[in-house]
Structure formats: C-alpha cells, structure tokens
Image (cartoon, rainbow, N blue to C red):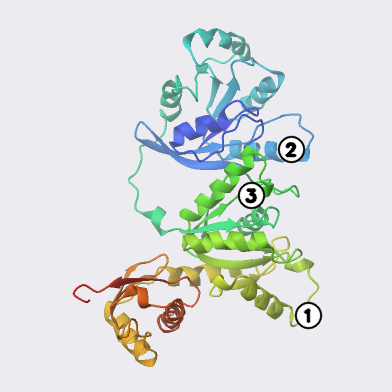
Amino acid sequence: MVAIVGRPNVGKSTLFNRLSLDKKAIVVDQPGTTRDRNYAEATWNGKTFTIIDTGGFEPVAKMRILVQMREQTTLAIEEADAIIFLMDGPEGLTPSDIEVADLLRKVKKPVYYTVNKIDVPKHEALSSDFYRLGVDDLYLISAQHGGLGVGDLMDAVVEGFSDTVEPDDEEEERIRIAVIGRPNVGKSSLVNRILGYDRLIVNPEPGTTRDVIDTLFELNDKKYLFVDTAGIRRKSRISQKLEKYCVVEAMKTLQRCDIALLLIDVTEGITEQDAKIAGLAYERGAACIIVLNKWDLLPKDNATIGSWALQVKDTLKFLDFAPILSLSALTGQRVIKIFELIDLVYEEYTRRLATSKINAELEDITQRLAPSRYRNRPNKINYATQFSIKPPSFLLFVRDPKGIHFSYERYLKNQFRERFGLDHVPVRLIFRKKSGLS
C-alpha cells in the first residue's frame, strides 16, 4: 500500500487519479475536497499495488471535521508500506509541511518527499526552499500537466516491491454492495459498524462523505465489497459544483454494484427523495435491500414493523420484491442480519435456469392465463430462454410483441418469481417477434 499525504489542496487526488488511471477521486480547486481515505489499484513497471488518497493533513486543526480528517490520514500512514509526502511548489515550504515532515521522520517506512505543481523546468527553482527539510532525495513532479517527474518518483517507490502475481479472478467473486441514500441517513455509520472500526468519517454534518469509498470485507469465507456513496440530494439543492460530482459518482457506483442497500431514516419517514434514489437503483436493475435505519430511536409496539413494511410497499411499489430490514447502525441492532439477506438476494440475482425448465413452466403459465388476442388473432408465446443474470433476464418469442399488455407482463414476472425462486430480485422480460411468423 502506498499512501499519499500532505496539506489540503496540494494535488493528492490529482496524483491519485493519474496513478490509478481512473477519475475515482473528486478533484476540485477547493481545499478539503477529499475527506475519507480512498483506495484504488495501480500498476507501475509491472508491479501492482494499492494507492491511498487521503484528506488534507492539518497538524494543528481544531475543527471537528479537520481533526477527523487528520485521524483518517494517520490511519492511512499506519496501513501503508510506503508514503508519498506531497507539497505545493508555488506555495513554498510552510510550517504545516515542516510539522508533517517531523511526524513522518518517526515512521519507520520509506517516505518519498515530493514537490508538486512544478509544471515546467523553469519552476524547478521553486523547490530550493524544500531542501531545508534535510532530505537526501526530493522528487519534483507535475501531477496535472503531463505527469512530469511522476515516472522517476514511481520508479523509486516500486523498486522494492515484489512482482505482481497474476489475478485468480478473486475480484469477480466478491459481492459488490452499494450503500445509498439521502445525506445523513447513516450510510457511513453502517459501514463502520459492519467493519468494526472507523473506516469512514461519521459527522452529523450532511454531505461528509464525498468520494465513493470501497472497502473489502470477508465473513465466513465469503468476500464482500462495500461501497459507501455520497448522499444523493434533490437537484434543486445541489448548488455547488462539488455536490454535483458527488451525485454523479453515487449514480455511477450503482453501475458496478450487484446489490444496493437503500438506507431510510425512520425518524424522518420515507421522503420523495428516497423514492427517487430507489428509482435509480431499479432502473439500473440492481437487487435492493431496504434498510430502515435508526430503529432504536422509534417508539415501537408489535405492529410497528408491519405498518412500516406496508408504508414501504405502498410508497415504493416498483420495489415490492425487495426485502426490508430494520436496524440501528448506531447500536448494532440486527446489523449482522444484513449478510443473511445479501447472500439470499445474491444467490437469486445470479441464478441461471435450464431452458427446458423455463419452457415447461411457461407452458403451464400460459395455459392458466393466455395472452390477450391481438388484431383478432391469438398472440401465443412460443419459446423462452434466459440470456443474462444480474438481474435474471429472459427472452420470450411471441407472435407480436406489441400485443403484450403491461398487465400480462406483470403477471408473467410474478409467475417467474414464484416458480423459479426469484422472490427478492428484479426480473427482466424482453419480448421478440418469432422469425417466420406474420
């Protein structure tokens, strides 16, 4: 692991993106954009390693959020095998740089002192002040403009690394879970509770999580990848450029995840924005688990969970298949049950069915209730096959797809769920005209 540390706005996320070849970290000309640790795989000279982007490190910060950012950076330093200490060339050596350098001297790990924003050769004169740190090697780079000097830096960083072992498809075996919801509903608290330590910053201020944060987790020999996302706000409330990035990244996260944990704050009820976020997951075709968080704060009786389940089903009709779990990320109440549901849902989400079984059941389904006649002719479904998983997707050949009413399509989906054990996942049906029929 290689951690990039330094003061706010020195270009850590820009270097992170360049090394990972992926615009995973948000880059805005605004100090403090990165708050949590952010991880990505990187390869240099045939050697693969994990790069860690960190929030800005302010040694004497008093504000709670800055103190937490400092704590996250300290954890990254402890995790890392090597550290890139990034400084800002045009700004010169600052007292905060000197304090960070003093801290890193106590760390018994390789530290690469690096001056960023040396965009053209004539800027090299800006680096002279940094030699006051008394280090043997000083790396001058431009992370943004063509990556000048980055090659020399990374050659040095990976020199002692072991050669990359060919992957064994382990990455594909992980169940990918996106934790989504409005700001401040407890997404980061839930991930921290699952992990058992403060992987993510938790702060009452809405919008604390900005980047999409990946965290690997293993339980009972099963591998999971949890992705905590920035809270998705209403468009009318996304006034800053930074928040727009956060929403886009959260939406993109759904594209690479199998299951969405949709967190709802029971102290606020199900809002219009909750429904819109749920709609994003549904349109993506993700399996969903609806998580009613902050359950410990709710006055309850024996009918409470039942009334909430009815409210969820009524408000989120399009997710009527999604299981519902009430829990408290703060106290840990029923959090472990998430994994029972994840395993159940993932098994259904990746289930493949034999074509012979599909058509045997389809014949019985259509005999019980045939499609409506279309243009005064029977509109028989001749054949069906499964063509994809994640979600289970079926191709049905019919005389005329235009004649399949949405109510009959709903009937078919319900029958497929019941007969094939797909009770908790979305099911997609695609109707095609059978060739040779007129």
Q: Residue at x 43, y 83 (%)?
A: 415
Q: Is residue 274 visible?
A: yes
Amino acid tagged 3: Lys
Q: Earlier in the sequence, mark 3 or mark 1?
A: 3
**Residue denoted by label 2:** 67
Q: CA distance from mark 2 to mark 3?
A: 30 Å
**Residue denoted by label 3:** 235
Q: Are marks 3 and 1 in contact (CB under 8 Å)?
A: no
Quadrant holding the C terminus? bottom left
Q: CA distance from mark 3 to mark 1?
A: 37 Å
Q: Earlier in the sequence, mark 2 or mark 1?
A: 2
Please tell me how crowded label 2 is: few (under 14), some (14-19), or many (20+) other residues with Cα within 10 Å: some
Tag shown at residue 301: 1
Task: Please tell me whether mark 2 or mark 1 is closer to you in this view.
Answer: 1
Q: Nearer the viewer, residue 44 or 259?
A: 259
Q: Residue 412 location, x and y as percent?
A: 41, 80
Q: Residue at x 67, y 42 (%)?
A: 239
Q: Residue 396 location, x and y as percent?
A: 32, 75
Q: Are marks 2 and 1 in contact (CB under 8 Å)?
A: no
Amino acid tagged 2: Val
